[in-house]
Amino acid sequence: MAITGRSDGPPLGPPDRLVAGLRGWAGVLGERSAALGVPVPLDAVDLLGERAAIAGLRRLGQTSCGGATRLVRAVDGWLAVALPRPEDRELLPAWLGIDGAGVETPWAAVAAALGDRRAREAAESAWQLGLPVSELPEEPVAPPTAPPPLAPLPVRATPVPGPPPDRRLLTDMTVVDLSSLWAGPLCGNLLSLAGARVVKVESTSRPDGGRGGPREFFDLLNGGKRGVALDLAQEDGWSVLRRLLALADVVIEGSRPRALERHGIVAADLVAAGGPRLWVSITGHGRTGTGRDRVAFGDDAAVAGGLVAADEAGPCFCADAIADPAAGLAASAACLDALAAGGRWVLDVAMADVAASLAGPTLVPRAGSVDEAYDVAPPRARPVTSPAPALGEHTVEVLNGLGVTT
């Protein structure tokens, strides 16, 4: 609540399914981690505020806590428009039909242009350009549910035929984490806490963008992992990566599928061939369908799932990039659940789907006027127990230990 609502108004209550949903996933994580490795007790709600606690972020209403995304009104609805990268702003003239001078005041240009356009038409034209833009749905979105024997988590889980994997504890498993920023690294962090050996793989030319953010937050998500860096501008780097993935028990990645497929890395094929027993893909809008090539970040993906708070003046962002930590938690719970069930799986975790499973009417936290001032707890973060590895710090050690030659 401390980071949800307008900057000049009271904090807003959560959507009605949010707390119960998060705590349910944390319960699956706790039960499965205790059975497979090291128990991971967790206050799931705390995960939502860790970056805000570390970076000193605050609630800004229709501007995201991080400042890079805004809720903008169109003729017939609302759009979440994210402009975190320089290239996003450079594409505004093509998207909005304005001259280049409009980029100097991007948010004014966005508001003026979208005020005359329909939300779906504007969103679809943004997707064609690769812009992270989402439409706030008018009706609740039905998220997927993992099939039996898995727990009912908001993921698409596909069983893959292949050699039956042996039964092992997490302490004997290797997780290769190719992800970046927040959701995937959090999933890897929680698996590490449960006892798995997590290897963080980065490109030497394009390392995890989280390295450019608050160091304490990067350490929180990546401390205790082993760091490998590969030159993915060269085929030799991809060759090493393919061999490394074949030796992993679990792979976590957050790339749009075509980014890996064009280098001969096809998730289901690797799993079926006896490589990783579990492939965990965390993206904005999933691995299949029209959304597989869409770009997304935590705030706009949350809006795509309808996960916002609202007052009489309209929608506000719910917490800080909430689809990121929620997806990281859901992915880690689904991963441990699938490992406990056995077999081989591809888990498709879409941040928008995870958000949809938590969306609902905004709760009023206390009877009386919504203008009433509330005492709410500030966001807090778990303590950092070890620093994240430097870029490529353990490359030689890890590759030699796994028998991967360069």
Image (cartoon, helix red, strand yellow):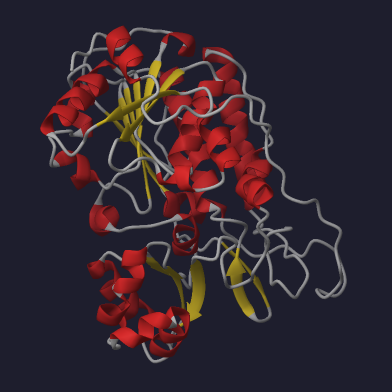
The x and y percentages for residue 48 are 62, 47
Say which residue appears at 46% left-offset and 27% top-offset: 389
Q: Residue at x 48, y 34 (%)?
A: 187
Count of labels in the image: 0
Q: Quadrant of the N terminus?
A: bottom right
Question: Taking 165 as reference, is 46 above or below it?
Answer: below
* Picture coordinates of residue 91, whole percent (x, y): 29, 73
Q: Quadrant of the C terminus?
A: top left
Residue 260 picture quarter: top left
Q: Is 245 situated above or below 144?
A: above
Determine if residue 118 is in view.
no
Picture layout, residue 181 above or below residue 271: below
* Vertical order, 71 against 16 (above or below): below
Q: Quadrant of residue 27?
A: top right
Seen from the viewer's position, the closer of residues 345 and 116 is 116
* Residue depicted at 38% across the width and 38% down the height: 179
Please give left or right for residue 178 compared with residue 194 in the image.
left
Q: Is residue 286 left or right of residue 70?
A: left
Specify the quadrant of the image occupied by residue 250.
Answer: top left
> Which percent across, then down, holds residue 200?
39, 28
Report whether residue 123 is seen: yes
Depth check: 252 or 350 in front? 252
Please give the name of the residue rendered at 31% of the width and 12% of the height, measured from the top-left corner: 165
